[in-house]
Image (tube, rainbow, N blue to C red):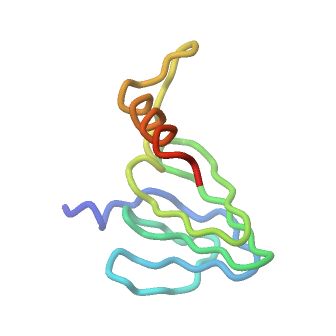
Amino acid sequence: MDIQSTIVATVTSAKGVVMVRTAEGITKPVSAGDQLHANDTLITGAGAEVEIDLINGEKLVVNEPTELFLDESTYTATEYSGNEIEPDVLQQIQESLGEGIT
């Protein structure tokens, strides 16, 4: 099965203009009950709000105006204990600080 056919979330509510752009580039409206797939982009317009249930059990509310790319980092659980930071995350932070934040 290819990753883009993997269901990663279900829309539980949608208010206002909420769209999804599929990995294939097709943009269509979203409503409660719709399933979202890996590599889809969730798009909310002005005044919009959408709530989704991710496959990792988390609920996510996306407000206006936002584009959220549903890659693996969005729908997989990451656990941290105490104040630990994963080494690759720490490296990304250090690189960003070295380049300056815009």
Point out residue 58 in the picture as x, y percentages from the top left corner: 58, 43
Q: Where 84 falls versus 35 (above or below)?
A: above
Q: In which quarter of the image is the N terminus?
A: bottom left
Q: Which residue is drawn at 49% across and 68% down?
A: 35
Rendered view: 79 above or below 84 = below
Q: Quadrant of residue 19?
A: bottom right
In-image side of 49 versus 27 (left or right): right
In depth, the one of 49 and 66 nearer the eye is: 66
96 displayed left or right of 59: left
Give percent across and percent down for residue 41: 48, 70
The residue nearer to you, when weighing 58 against 74, is 74
Q: Residue lying furthest top in this view? A: 82
Picture coordinates of residue 3, whole percent (x, y) = 26, 60
Quarter of the picture containing the C terminus is bottom right
Residue at left 37%, top 65%? 39
Residue 11 location, x and y as percent?
59, 65
Outermost residue, left direction?
1
